[in-house]
Amino acid sequence: MNKTLTTALFALLSSAFVCVHGSAPSQPLPVPGAGGVAIAIKAFLERQEGGQTTAPLLANIAHDVEFTYSGDELEQVKRGKERVPAFLDVGINGKPFAARSAKEFVTQIDNLVASKKADGRVLTHEIGAIRANCQSQECSLAVVEFTRIYTVGGGKQMHVPMRATALMKYERTEGANFRIYHWHASPRR
């Protein structure tokens, strides 16, 4: 009887192991740490290329506090009067644009992408390198060097070398699990 019980128990546990470990998960697990940060940056640039909104990849931080100096005195800026943008980028004309909120930045990026399509331009990015660091779920860092390539009618291309710094936070949601709450992109020299 002991041998029969042992054999039945072994068969039951073996089949449970095969069912759990032998089948694919129902949805892909998020990539942890620095790899997840790099994937979010790549997804942010790819959404711009595809004309998709970048909104799902951006976040606001509700606890920012802005200060100014008046002479030698530090003064806290009242909510709603902030001047320091959290999102900065450069348009095809080389002029910088900035936004204080993710919603405002999404509007600007989406308009930039839509204007390219209307003018018959195609936007692509070549990522050279991403330096990512995931210190905590509240603040992860990425520095990305990339080339923004605008292709106009006739196949003529304009290459703009760029460098961006992004601060991100981790959110356990579907899709990319890191959300950008600070983006500063500028031409790289």
Image (cartoon, helix red, strand yellow):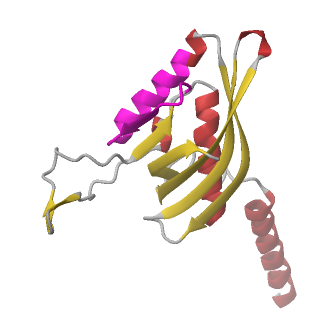
Q: Is residue 174 left or right of residue 80?
A: right
Q: Looking at the image, can residue 128 be seen?
A: yes
Q: Is residue 108 left or right of residue 36?
A: left
Q: Residue furthest front?
A: 71
Q: In terms of depth relative to the viewer, which is nearer, 119 or 5? A: 119
**Where is 42 relative to 31, above or below?**
above
Q: Is residue 51 magenta?
A: no
Q: In terms of depth relative to the viewer, which is nearer, 62 or 173? A: 62
Looking at the rendering, in which quadrant would you find the N terminus?
bottom right
Q: Is residue 105 magenta?
A: yes
Looking at the image, which residue is at 56% across and 49% down?
164
Q: Is residue 98 left or right of residue 137?
A: left
Q: Looking at the image, can residue 29 be seen?
A: no
Q: In terms of depth relative to the viewer, which is nearer, 68 or 46? A: 68
Question: Total marks drawn?
Answer: 0
Residue 124 image position (x, y, % from top left):
69, 30
Residue 40 image position (x, y, % from top left):
59, 49
**Where is 87 relative to 14, above or below?**
above
Looking at the image, which residue is at 62% across and 57% down?
36
Residue 77 image position (x, y, % from top left):
15, 55
Looking at the image, which residue is at 32% across and 42% down?
100
Looking at the image, which residue is at 23% across and 57% down?
66
Q: Residue furthest bottom?
A: 2
The residue segment tinted magenta is 92-115
Residue 178 image position (x, y, % from top left):
52, 53
Q: Quadrant of residue 131?
A: bottom right
